[in-house]
Each structure stands twice: as C-alpha cells, then as structure tokens.
Image (tube, rainbow, N blue to C red):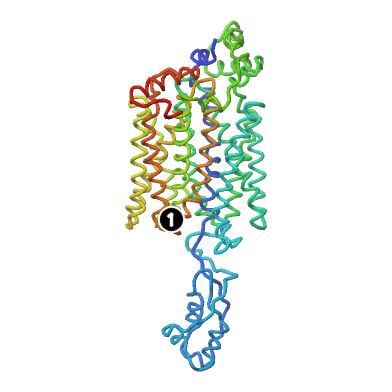
Amino acid sequence: MHFDDLLKVLGELGRYQQIRLFYIYLVAIVCAFHAMNMVFVSAKPDYKCHVSKANVSHRIFGNTTEKDFQDFLQSAGKCEIYDEKMVSKLISSGKYTLNDIITKNVTVPKNKCTEWDYSREVYGPTIVTQFDLVCDKDWLRSTSKTLYFFGRLVGAVCFGQLSDIVGRKPTFFACLLMLLIVGCVASAAPNFYVFIPFYILQGAAQTGLFLVIFIMGTELVGPSYRMFAGFVIHAFYAIGYMTLAGLSYGIGNWRYIELVITIPVVLFVPYIWLLPESIRWLLSNHKEEEAKRIIRKVAAANHVEISEELLEDLTKLDEKSETETKGRQYTIIDLCRPGIICLSLNVWFNWLVNAMLYYGLSLGTGNLGGDPYINFCIAGAVEIPACIMCILILNPLGRRRPLCVIMVIGGAACIATGFIELIPLKITLAMIGKFCITSSYTIIYLMAAEVFPTVVRNIGIGVSSMCARIGGMLAPQILELNRIWGPLPLIVFGGLAIFSGALALLLPETSGKPLPQTLEDVIGTEKRNAKYRGIKMKDCS
C-alpha cells in the first residue's frame, strides 16, 4: 500500500495533522522575519556631510548665522564638503561675504566627507549609519543584500540535501540552532566585515528552515490537501512579513531588530516533543518501526482504527520500488536532453524572474514615496489574497494561462509605476504588481512539481530553487539602476515579467493531468505539443 492510500484511511487532514500544521505555520512567521529584515536593517536614510560647529560671531561675518555657514559648506554634495578654512579665509580677507561667495560663484576647493549626519525622521540606526555605507562605500550596502541571497542559495542546496540524508526533524533543529547563533552574533557585530559572514549564514539558515518546514507540512497531509497546505504556509509567511513592519517601526535600532526577530527561535524548543519525523522519510529510509509508532499516534488522534495487517502491508517494498532502486541514477544532464531542454529552461527562467521581481518589489518599497513601513506592510498584506486567489482559480482555469495573464498584468503595473508621480497611485500600481508576482510565483512553484517527471522531479525543483536564489541575488543590483534613471529598475522588472509570462504559454497545461513518470512521457508530450504549434523540436534542442 502507498502512504497516500493509508492517509485516506487515517484522514488526509485530521486533527493530528491540523495541530502539527499550525505548529509548522508559526515557524513560517519567523522565517519571514529573517527573509525580509534587510529592508529595515540595511535601510539608507537621508544624510549629509558632518560639519563641526563654526564660530561666526566675529563682526566680519556680518549677519551670517552658524546654520547659514554650515548649509553652504554642505551644499557641495552628499559626499563632498567645501573647505571650511578657505571659506573663512575668503570672508576674513574682507573681499567677500558668504552671500558673495554663493552668488558670484567664487571657486572654493572641496574635500571628501569623512563623517556624516544621518536623518532619524524615518529610520533609526541601520548598518548604513552604523558602518557609514555611503558614498565610496555605498556599493557595500547592495552587496550585503546580494551576499545574503547567496547565503540563501547555499542554504537551499546544503539543507535540502541534509534533510534527505539525516531526516527532516534533525535538519529543522540544526537550522533553528544556527539561526539563533548567527542572528545574535550579527546583531553584536562591531564592524561590517564581521557582520557580513554571519548575515550570509543567517540567509542560509533561514532558507534551510523554510525549506524543511514546507516539506514537513506537505508530507504530513494527503494528496487532496497538499496544495492547500503549501498555500497556507505562504499566508502565515505573509503575516510575518506584515508583523516585521510593525516591529521595525517600534524598535528602530537595527541591532535590536535583529535580536527581537532571532530570540523567538527559542520558543520552538518544545517542538522536539511536539513535531514528529516525516513518516514518508522514515518509510523511504527503512525505519519501519518508528514510522508505525507515529502512524498509530495519528490514528489515535484522528479517532481511526488501523490494523497491524495494514501497517505491515504499508512497510513492504513492492517489486516496482525495488526495481526503481536498482535502476540508473538520473542527473541534471537528463533535463538538458533534446525534447525536454526547452521545458526545463522555461521553468527555470520563470523561477528566476519571479524571484527577482518578488524580492525586487519587496526591497524597493522604500523607494515608492510615502511611509516605507506602511508600504512594506501593504506589500505583505496583498500576499494573503494572492494565495486565496490561487486556491480558487488554479483547478477551474488551469495553470498555464493564469500564469501568463497574471505575469503580463504584473509586468505592466511595474512599468507604469516607474512613470507615475502621484504617490497614492504609484503605491497602488506597485501593490498590484506585488499581488500578481506573488500569485505567479505560487503557480510556477506548483507547475514545477507537475511538469518534471518523477524520475527527475527533485533535481528539476532543486535547480529551479537555485535559479530563484540567483534571481534574488540580482534584485538588489537591479534596484541600484535607479542611479542611472529613476524608472529603470521597474522597467527592467516589468519587461522581464511580460517576456516570462509570454514564455509560460509554451509550458504544458498540467491541471487535471496525471503526473509524468518518465522522461519519455514528457518528451512524447512535448513533441505532440510542438507539432500542434508548428514548432520543430530540433530548434529547441
């Protein structure tokens, strides 16, 4: 008997699963804290060069006030300052007043700033103000975000493999412990070069943790509720997203923000007793006795009687399973074979673009105008209706066409946002883009599990996840294009979304279709689809 068949007897979403899913969903909130904290931890407030107090009481300065004198020195730019001694010398000579220097464009040498004054109107202390990541060091700010996403890529690869080798539960606690340690150390970092390695490790731990709880949640329920469980975990993630805005607004200081979002990890220590190991993982690793023990607990909690004969039947490997374990090993090369490479590249490119836009729009909420905390909270709030919409439309309307339409609308909204000056309308269009990209990200996540055949499904989704991390790494760098032209980042995001949405029409429709088992199943389907569209397969291979 297959475990999915047993779940139909035990209850696909019984009381036991409901309670454990809730425990898992609470962890998703903390994952969101650490996924998005960079928005506030590395926020860049307004700044100007620091000017020491000037003595303008001498009569030769006339009516010049200290503020007038300082404002002129700072008017050289955010990274340069007029030479204070030269200005004082010009005025002391009696030939010029401060007004003469300004109006007659008198040449005054400039010096590079060495200290800055940072505005506290919007943000409290951040790593930018703490470590002076402005002017010549400004590139370190965006690089810190990119390196964080690099950490997430490493976490996806390492912890994904680790959970398959040692189990979901040990990996879960390894990620929790790592997140607790690196989060606390990062909050106390004395300089940027100590902070950044632990920030990278924080990204790895966060991604590993979310990956494991997502797997644990979907493996806990029956096939009828798997999509529902996956979408609800994203809804709790959105709750964490919104909560982070309130915490950051109330706390202010980046060090305390890091501590406050890290310490709650301790609350999950009781999960040692509350969360079970994945039954599917136990069965696949021949740990039948432990699997039986947990199954009996599930049956008792769901008020279902289960016979020992049924348990014995479940833990027996059938001939097909033995044959498969003795068969050849598949690799990423199989996903690049003629007849399937177009499909693979299409799915991977969609993952990359969706992740790039998702994080680009999330990180860019502070550039929209208005209150960045409210903007960020709204950006998190739109994810909940986006998930609900996906649950409602994906089965009746399919996957492919909704994916295309949603991405095109989201891309158009992004491009329009770049050219709108009216702040309420600008924010509204940006949130439409965020709503759409959240929906499309959810859809392509599901489609990846449905288009890749069973023999290479884990490999296909693993590469998809890596592409998503690369998209996240690129997002902060694309946001920096606003130095060239303000609307440019949104134009790039929007253009890629529209192009990616158009490519989605070339993907096969998977709604209501049986999952492909072998590479030949996919290659045969692709050939038939290509013939129908008038495309030669050799052109794609």
Viewer-proximal residue, 190 or 220? Answer: 190
Viewer-proximal residue, 116 or 376? Answer: 116
Viewer-proximal residue, 270 or 408? Answer: 408
Residue 541, horizontal then vertical, whole percent: 46, 28
Residue 57, horizontal then vertical, whole percent: 53, 89
Q: Is residue 524 above or below residue 318?
A: below
| In this picture, residue 485 sits left or right of residue 146 | left
Q: Image quadrant for the N terminus?
A: top right
Taking the spot 59% from the left edge, 50% from the top edge, the residue there is 258
| In this picture, residue 423 sits left or right of residue 293 | left
Q: Is residue 494 above or below residue 441?
A: below
Q: Characterize the local packing of mark 1: few (<14), some (14-19) or many (20 or more) Cα atoms within 10 angstroms.
A: some
In the picture of the structure, the residue carrying the numbered disc 1 is 367
Q: Is residue 508 above or below residue 380?
A: above
Taking the spot 55% from the left edge, 19% from the top edge, the residue there is 301
Outermost residue, top side:
309
Q: Is residue 38 above or below residue 270?
A: below
